[in-house]
Image (cartoon, helix red, strand yellow):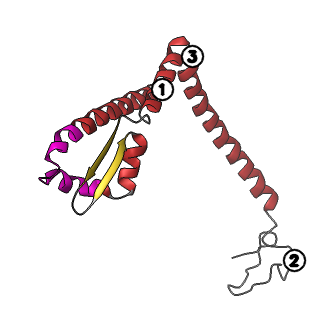
Amino acid sequence: MVCPKCGVPIKRFDLAPNCKQCGVHIMYYTQEEDLARDAKLCELEFAKTRAFVDKIKVGFVKNRFSLARMIIIIVGIAFLFIPYSDISAALPLRSFEFTLSGWGIYKLVSDGLLMQLPNILKSEIASELTGFLLAEIAVFLVAFLALLGVFCTCLIGFLN
């Protein structure tokens, strides 16, 4: 390493903050230029982000149809959190109950019951519940995947 002002070589283990030859503070000598460079880079990144946000804004609220599409997507996501049905079963070793909705699926995953669900559905005790439960979960997942596909397609269309 060399001194930025006078060019005198500085030893590797010299921990003094100032140059022994000219007395300049080595770390803060180029602080003005470094701050100016950082400010320019920050302005460029902010301009890129602003352009990206403007594209999304124009895509969502460009006209009445795109605004209506956005409202329908948000309402569709909200409908996924409305409980469709309450499911409860009492098995010999475990009893469980959950609500078939977005929040219920989250609780199902967080409680660890989702990994046990195939074993529960294969048991003879839950044979009556199996068809009904699988049909409800399938309808919910189809609605969720359709809504997710519509949202992703709209978002990709807006960005392009």
Q: Position of residue 81 (x, y in %)?
A: 44, 36
Q: Is residue 119 left or right of residue 158?
A: left
Instruction: Indicate which disc, 2 or 3, sits on the residue closer to the N terminus.
Output: 2
Q: Position of residue 132 (x, y in %)?
A: 21, 37
Q: Is residue 87 above or below residue 91?
A: above
Q: Is residue 148 above or below residue 68?
A: below
Label 3: which secondary element: loop
Q: Is residue 3 left or right of residue 72?
A: right
Q: At x 70% / y 42%, what residue is drawn?
A: 43
Q: Is residue 28 magenta?
A: no
Q: Is residue 48 above or below residue 27?
A: above
Q: At x 77% / y 78%, what residue is drawn?
A: 8
The kind of secondary structure the magenta stretch mainly shows is helix
Query: Which residue is at the far left?
Result: 124
The tag on residue 22 is: 2
Q: Is residue 132 magenta?
A: yes
Q: Is residue 158 left or right of residue 137?
A: right
* Residue tagged 3: 62
Q: Is residue 75 above or below residue 107?
A: above
Measure the alpha-carbon separation of dots 2 and 1.
69 Å
Dot 2 alpha-carbon crowd within 10 angstroms: few under 14, some 14 to 19, many 20 or more: few
Quadrant in the rendering for residue 11: bottom right
Query: Which residue is at the far right?
Result: 23
Query: Which residue is at the far top?
Result: 64
* Residue tagged 1: 75
Q: At x 20% / y 54%, what residue is drawn?
A: 120
Q: Amino acid at mark 3?
A: Lys
Asked if labels 1 and 3 touch by Cβ distance under 8 angstroms, the answer is no
Tell me where the magenta segment starts and ends, as one range.
Answer: 114-134
Dot 1 alpha-carbon crowd within 10 angstroms: few under 14, some 14 to 19, many 20 or more: few
State the residue in front, 157 or 17: 157
Q: Amino acid at mark 2?
A: Cys
